[in-house]
Image (cartoon, rainbow, N blue to C red):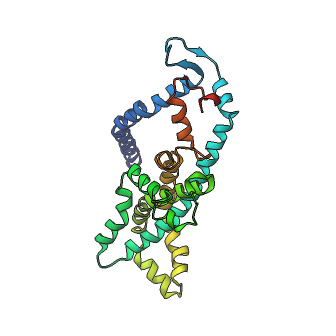
């Protein structure tokens, strides 16, 4: 009788849980699942803004066009390079900042506020500050380079500046997420490791990081998704010139011109 009552209670809890999440699930389906499915449906059609009623089902021709376009592969490589390098740098710097903010005793609020200031600045405004800083003749950073240097006119230096701007802007966000993970590390465990003779590096690698693994994975997921969508910094700093355009830049270039919707043609670039 007790087992039956317990089983019924668990089923009731599950039903209650499903009822509670049902509104949120339906809302997510409405605002995410439907647009995604509709976009996929449009991607297998030839669709023109000029004649929206004249749709032509082309199966996978649009995908073949995109995957055979060198502009797409160039943009994808640039996006991956920026994403991987910037996220890895942000992870290291973010963890260092999180450790500083976590261990700061005096002025903790001031330290955290100062660290988070770059993340609070509008991305476009921050991008323009980097643009003017690297402009030859007027930029204070450009003046540190040899005469005649113009980093924003070459691919590799331009990508380096874009990555630098990304790291400066979003490292505080990574630090904030990792700081939440540091709060999960028990001080008693760190003290026990110290008593056992573990130095600071060993405690970080063998104790702190393993416990923070869920927070680290969440931070990496959020930042990777965000970095892959990079648009503002590239648009302001280079406008995608010198082979620095990302996937978002390429998509915007195509969609902003009166061509076909869902068909990435080389002529549209």
Q: What's the residue at 45%, 78% (across, down)? A: 189
Left of 110 or right of it: where is 190? right
**In the foreground, 77 or 125:** 125
For this orientation, the residue located farthest to the top is 54
Report x, y in % for residue 105.
Answer: 32, 79
In the depicted structure, whether residue 235 falls above or below residue 205: above
Q: Quadrant of residue 108?
A: bottom left
Report x, y in % for residue 34.
Answer: 46, 28
Left of 120 or right of it: where is 166? right
**In the foreground, 216 or 54:** 54
In the depicted structure, whether residue 31 falls above or below residue 85: above
For this orientation, the residue located farthest to the right is 68
Quarter of the figure that contains the C terminus = top right
Report x, y in % for residue 233.
Answer: 48, 50
**In the foreground, 36 or 12:** 36
**In the foreground, 173 or 31:** 173
Report x, y in % for residue 208.
Answer: 49, 72
Q: What's the residue at 38%, 76% (across, down)? A: 103
Q: Is residue 214 visible?
A: no
Q: Quadrant of residue 17?
A: top left
Left of 171 or right of it: where is 104? left
Q: Is residue 44 visible?
A: yes
Q: What's the residue at 43%, 70% (across, down)? A: 97
Count of picture labels: 0
Q: What's the residue at 45%, 57% (across, down)? A: 130
In the depicted structure, whether residue 110 falls above or below residue 53: below
């Amino acid at each position: 009788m007790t087992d039956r009552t317990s089983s019924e209670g668990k089923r009731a809890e599950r039903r209650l849980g499903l009822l509670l999440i049902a509104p949120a699930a339906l809302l997510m389906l409405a605002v995410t699942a439907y647009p995604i499915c509709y976009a996929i449906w449009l991607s297998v059609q030839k669709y023109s803004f000029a004649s929206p009623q004249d749709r032509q089902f082309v199966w996978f021709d649009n995908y073949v066009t995109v995957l055979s376009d060198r502009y797409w592969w160039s943009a994808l490589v640039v996006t991956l390079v920026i994403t991987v390098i910037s996220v890895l740098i942000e992870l290291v710097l973010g963890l260092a900042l999180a450790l500083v903010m976590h261990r700061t005793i005096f002025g903790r609020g001031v330290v955290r506020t100062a660290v988070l200031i770059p993340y609070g600045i509008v991305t476009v405004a921050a991008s323009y500050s980097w643009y003017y800083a690297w402009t030859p003749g007027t930029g204070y950073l450009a003046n540190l380079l040899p005469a005649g240097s113009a980093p924003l006119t070459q691919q590799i230096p331009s990508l380096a500046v874009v990555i630098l701007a990304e790291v400066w802007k979003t490292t505080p966000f990574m630090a904030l997420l990792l700081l939440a993970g540091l709060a999960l590390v028990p001080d008693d465990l760190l003290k026990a490791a110290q008593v056992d003779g573990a130095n600071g590096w060993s405690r970080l690698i063998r104790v702190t990081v393993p416990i923070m693994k869920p927070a680290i994975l969440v931070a990496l997921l959020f930042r990777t998704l965000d970095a892959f969508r990079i648009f503002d910094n590239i648009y302001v700093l280079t406008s995608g010139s010198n082979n620095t355009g990302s996937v978002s830049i390429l998509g915007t270039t195509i969609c902003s011109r009166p061509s076909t919707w869902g068909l990435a043609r080389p002529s549209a670039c």
